[in-house]
Image (tube, rainbow, N blue to C red):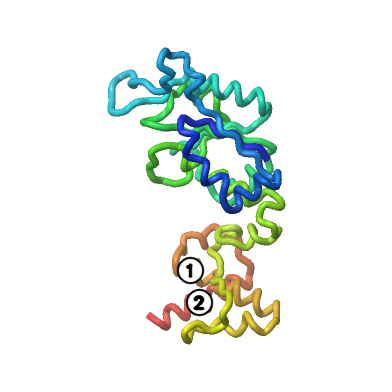
Amino acid sequence: MTVEILTVFPEMFGSVLSASILGRAREQGLLDVRLTDIRPFSKSKHKNTDDYPFGGGAGMVMMAQPIMDAMASAVSRLPGARRIYLGPRGRKLTTEVARELAGEESLILLCGHYEGVDQRALDTCVDEEISIGDYILTGGELAAMVLTDCVARFIPGVLGSAESAEEESFSDGLLEYPQYTRPRDLDGMAVPDVLLNGDHAKIRRWRRRESLAATLRYRPDLLESACLTAEDRKMLKELENECSFEN
């Protein structure tokens, strides 16, 4: 997959894109991330990309012209790419959205900054908006990093194991079960016996129950939309009864 990011602060991306899983994915040719500085596309004398908003108000707004020209340049290199603006009005980034985007051959991400973007640029240059959450950032650069990282995990080969992305929190609408590694006993805190007996059926059931328990405790709202089996609902009922008994 190719991801081209349009930004006025390309220097923000260096360490994120070169380290850990994203860095390895790029080295292996599984992910190609390109950074395009919007500033050189500005036709103003001082190459500025923002200006005061019509109608007054605090802050500055990103100008349409540099964005439109930068986007045209990106599209010439990636015809057919899905063009996304990281903005608060868009649909929220979820596991399902990330999995969907991972099926694209290429993405072009537009990072807003300052107090927003001239609406004319959004009307002509963007296929959709995506939000990473209901909070305010100083710019879209961090959101673009989050989206790129989230989407990359669903690209075949990036995580090394086909099961990894599907077993993590939110992959099936639930939080992930607890994880343990060596040593087996740490200052009296022992790894659950079920994980040590080699009975994979019991391990799967234990993990599913713990996943349901964590979701019930920390994010019960997720249970409303999670895909639950009859066995899941039975375990949930047991967990709810246990919680009632403890209270």
Query: Residues at badges 2 and 1 in contact (C-beta under 8 Å)?
Result: yes
Residue depicted at 58% across the width and 71% down the height: 233
Residue type highlighted by circle 1: Leu
Q: Is residue 2 above or below residue 20?
A: above
Q: Position of residue 173 (x, y in %)?
A: 56, 59
Q: How many labels does the image show?
A: 2
Q: Position of residue 79 (x, y in %)?
A: 68, 26
Dot 1: what SS? helix
Q: In this view, does 159 lie above or below 11?
A: below
| Tag 2 residue | 239
> Of label 2 and label 1, which has the lower sequence position?
1
Crowd class of label 2 (few under 14; some 14 to 19; many from 20; radius 10 Å): some
What label sits on residue 69 in the rendered view?
none
Q: Residue furthest bottom?
A: 188
Residue depicted at 68% across the width and 61% down the height: 163
Dot 2: what SS? helix
What label sits on residue 216 in the rendered view?
1
Quadrant in the picture for residue 170 = bottom right
